[in-house]
Image (cartoon, rainbow, N blue to C red):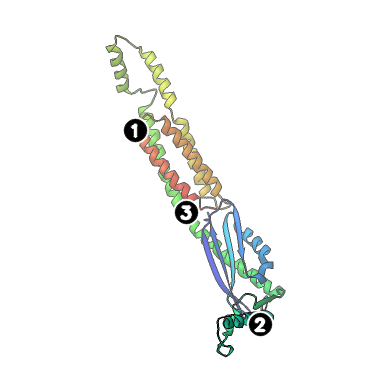
Amino acid sequence: MESMTGFASQLFHVKQDLFEVSVRSVNSRFLDIKVTVPTFLASLEPEVRALVRNYFYRGQIEVTIKAYSQQASVGGAAVVNYDMLKFYLRLSKKISMDLGASREGVTYNVPDFLRLPGVIEFRLQQLKASQKKLFLKSIQKVLALCQKERRREGRRLRLLLEGYLSVLKKLVEEVEAHFKVHFSVDQPALRLRQKIHQILGQKGLALSEERLMEEWAYLVDRVSIEEEISRIKEHLRHMNEWIQNDTEPIGKKLDFYTQELLREWNTVGSKSMDAQITKMVVQSKNVVENMKEQIQNIQ
């Protein structure tokens, strides 16, 4: 089992340049890939997306590459656009004169001018094959680390879901046992029979035992939850089998089963004529809702 939540990052050098690759993963219904890289690495984006698809089936995956140095060894070289710099200088002088400052009193801070738009240009160069290979290898390594983190979280989720299934199995068995005792055709509830005879006797009416059994059988059939109980047990069995499955993504399958469980428990609750069963139905639905929330994070 693999969670859709994970994060990994790593620093690496390409010659004199320092880079960081980070991979962040959160839950999503489908595979949603976002790649953020420096301009000179834009050509890598299709191959980065292909690598992501090799590791992940579902989730929103954000791959980010950051450059922490301005060397010319990778991607291109930073050059000064002197025409743009001269334009800013002339504009600065004009503003100073308009404000009444003397030419002699005007000073210029070169680093401030270098931060202005268009002064520094980054001229791209074609990535060398060896450099490209190193980038892709580093990205692949971080993707593997993120996948490892997702699997670690998946193991925690498996234990949590196994606990939920155990609670649900116990509750459905209790509901089934309670129903058999209080709504069995073979053993009609004695107090209900006596009450019916008492009410009819007060009105001078009588009801044969055979007719009473027919009415009781009709009532039990209308409120019977045996089919729902059987389906709930089957859903729980299938869910347990999928949770132990390590060969394919199971998040969507488990989500489907939680919807089916809620549907069956809702039917049991609507048929229930017993406060104890209603109480257990509420408890069961609460467990399924908690389970459903955790399943949203499973690939």
The residue positioned 42% from the left and 49% from the top of the image is: 163
Pick whichever of labels 2 and 3 is earlier in the sequence. 2
In the figure, 192 relative to 226: above or below? above
In the figure, 104 relative to 263: above or below? below
Residue reaching furthest to the top: 204
Residue at mark 2:
86
Pick whichever of labels 1 and 3 is earlier in the sequence. 3
Residue reaching furthest to the bottom: 104
The answer to whether any part of residue 72 appears in the image is no
The residue positioned 45% from the left and 33% from the top of the image is: 267
Measure how far apart labels 2 and 3 are at the Cα level.
62 Å
Q: Secondary structure at mark 1?
A: helix
Q: Whole-percent x and y of residue 38?
A: 63, 70
- The disc placed on residue 14 is none
Residue type at the position of mark 3 = Leu
In the figure, 235 relative to 214: above or below? below
Q: Whole-percent x and y of residue 53?
A: 63, 58
Residue at mark 1:
275
Q: Whole-percent x and y of residue 59?
A: 56, 55
